[in-house]
């Protein structure tokens, strides 16, 4: 509980520092030329994103980079966007694989530097839908290099659910599951405040009278309804997860049968022969479009730029998308045979669902709907929900 409260306090401080809206672009200068590689590179990353073959020898896109550049890679994994922002605020890192609910905060907090895309030869291969995405650009300036994207899926136990569940209700509403047992104590929810958007997305479909248009832009009534749903869910949830490996263990050993998850956990469990499947229910899904962002005080900027170029290598993009169950930011990695991925695999990972996914964004009071609840409220209120 002490660790939980400390994490919550840190997240609240981050959100409060931003205030009700987002500040202007960062003040760091854009690099105009590469220098001599500094010999080291420190990355804050989602679990499974920066692999050197230690988990599975078949997946290693770090060793060849180190051999080619002499940049020794160190990785610090983070389980939530708030943790990523906290680590970047502390400093000492060069790159971060930031999702949309972290990237704009990093720009507003002047913790990331503008990216000179002319120093990244493979930039022209990036999916056009991602090049100028609003979660890594500000006033026309790029602050990130698109990396991977995909949906937050509903992971389920195939022995409990002989057919894939069609609705997120199995984790939000008290009910008996197909095996005749209640869902109470057998489901999980994500422990990041951005999960409020998942509740809002469910309500968007099931309670149209609320008028929810965008799950990241909620007025007071819509926001109150989402919180009420989450307070009810608290009675069902046995654990709020953020550590992918802990969730994997929970599905293997602790009787968990349904939860929001990432394809990463689904793939690892399936590889171990565990009875799990995943689906995107009828209400749709939130999702993540992650970008490599350069710390404004990076000690190893040349190594960082070399890795951003390396990250757009078709082989890395192909193999990482198989490993994580994601969609490459370089579309040709799905079909060019450079790695393990195929056109069918990319389709299964959601390549055609781009317009159906509500990608993570930082909620602000300055929104199209007007008078929206800002992120610092999401943080404090979700801490209260999780604490019961």
Image: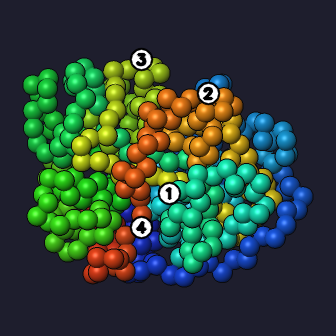
**Percent coordinates x, y for residue 87 in the rendering:** 56, 61
- Residue at 38%, 37% (x, y): give it: 247
Look at the numbered discs 1 and 4 and tell me whether their residues touch, using CB distance below 8 Å: no
How many angstroms separate mark 1 from mark 4 (CA)?
10 Å
Q: Which residue is mark 2?
A: 340
**Percent coordinates x, y for residue 150 in the rendering:** 45, 45
- Residue at 20%, 61% (x, y): give it: 226
Q: Looking at the figure, which quarter contains the C terminus?
A: bottom left
Neighbourhood count class around disc 1 (C-alpha, 10 Å): few under 14, some 14–19, many 20 upward: many
Q: Which residue is mark 1?
A: 99
- Residue at 40%, 53% (x, y): give it: 355
Q: Which residue is mark 4?
A: 362
Of all residues, the one furthest to the top in this rendering is 273
**Percent coordinates x, y for residue 252 in the rendering:** 35, 25
Left or right: residue 321 versus residue 365 is right
How many angstroms separate mark 3 from mark 1 (CA)?
30 Å
Look at the numbered discs 2 and 4 and tell me whether their residues touch, using CB distance below 8 Å: no
How many angstroms separate mark 2 from mark 1 (CA)?
25 Å
Nearer the N terminus, badge 1 or badge 4?
A: 1
Q: Quick one: SS at disc 3?
A: loop
Coloring scheme of the render?
rainbow
Q: Quick one: SS at disc 1?
A: loop
Let me know if residue 97 appears in the view.
Answer: no
Quarter of the image holding residue 49? Answer: top right
Nearer the N terminus, badge 3 or badge 1?
A: 1
Q: Which residue is mark 3?
A: 273
Q: Nearer the viewer, mark 2 or mark 4?
A: 2
Look at the numbered discs 4 and 3 and tell me whether their residues touch, using CB distance below 8 Å: no
């Amino acid at each position: 509980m002490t660790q939980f409260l400390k994490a919550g306090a840190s997240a609240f401080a981050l959100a409060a520092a931003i205030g009700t809206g987002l500040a202007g672009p960062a003040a760091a200068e854009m690099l105009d030329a590469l220098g001599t590689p500094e010999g080291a590179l420190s990355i804050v990353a989602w679990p499974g994103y920066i692999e050197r073959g230690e988990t599975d020898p078949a997946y290693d896109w770090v060793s060849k980079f180190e051999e080619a550049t002499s940049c020794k890679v160190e990785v610090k994994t983070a389980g939530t966007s708030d943790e990523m922002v906290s680590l970047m605020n502390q400093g000492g890192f060069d790159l971060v694989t930031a999702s949309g609910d972290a990237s704009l905060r990093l720009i507003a907090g002047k913790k990331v530097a503008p990216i000179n895309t002319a120093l990244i030869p493979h930039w022209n291969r990036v999916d056009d839908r991602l090049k100028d995405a609003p979660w890594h650009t500000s006033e026309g300036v790029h602050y990130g290099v698109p990396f991977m994207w995909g949906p937050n899926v509903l992971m389920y136990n195939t022995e409990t659910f002989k057919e894939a569940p069609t609705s997120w209700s199995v984790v939000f509403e008290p009910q008996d599951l197909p095996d005749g047992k209640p869902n109470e104590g057998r489901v999980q929810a994500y422990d990041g405040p951005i999960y409020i958007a998942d509740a809002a997305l469910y309500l968007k479909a099931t309670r149209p009278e609320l008028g929810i248009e965008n799950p990241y832009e909620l007025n007071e009534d819509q926001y109150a309804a989402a919180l009420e749903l989450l307070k009810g869910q608290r009675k069902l949830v046995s654990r709020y997860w953020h550590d992918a490996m802990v969730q994997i263990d929970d599905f293997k050993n602790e009787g968990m049968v349904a939860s929001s998850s990432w394809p990463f956990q689904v793939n690892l469990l399936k590889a171990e022969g565990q009875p799990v499947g995943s689906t995107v229910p009828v209400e749709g899904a939130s999702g993540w479009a992650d970008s490599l962002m350069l710390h404004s005080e990076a000690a190893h900027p040349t190594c960082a730029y070399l890795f951003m170029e390396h990250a757009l290598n078709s082989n890395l993009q192909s193999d990482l998308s198989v490993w994580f169950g994601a969609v490459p930011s370089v579309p040709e990695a799905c079909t060019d045979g450079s790695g393990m991925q195929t056109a069918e695999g990319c389709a299964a990972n959601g390549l055609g669902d781009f317009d159906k996914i509500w990608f993570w964004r930082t909620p602000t009071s300055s929104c199209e709907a007007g008078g929206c609840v800002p992120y610092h409220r999401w943080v404090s209120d979700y801490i209260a929900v999780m604490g019961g």
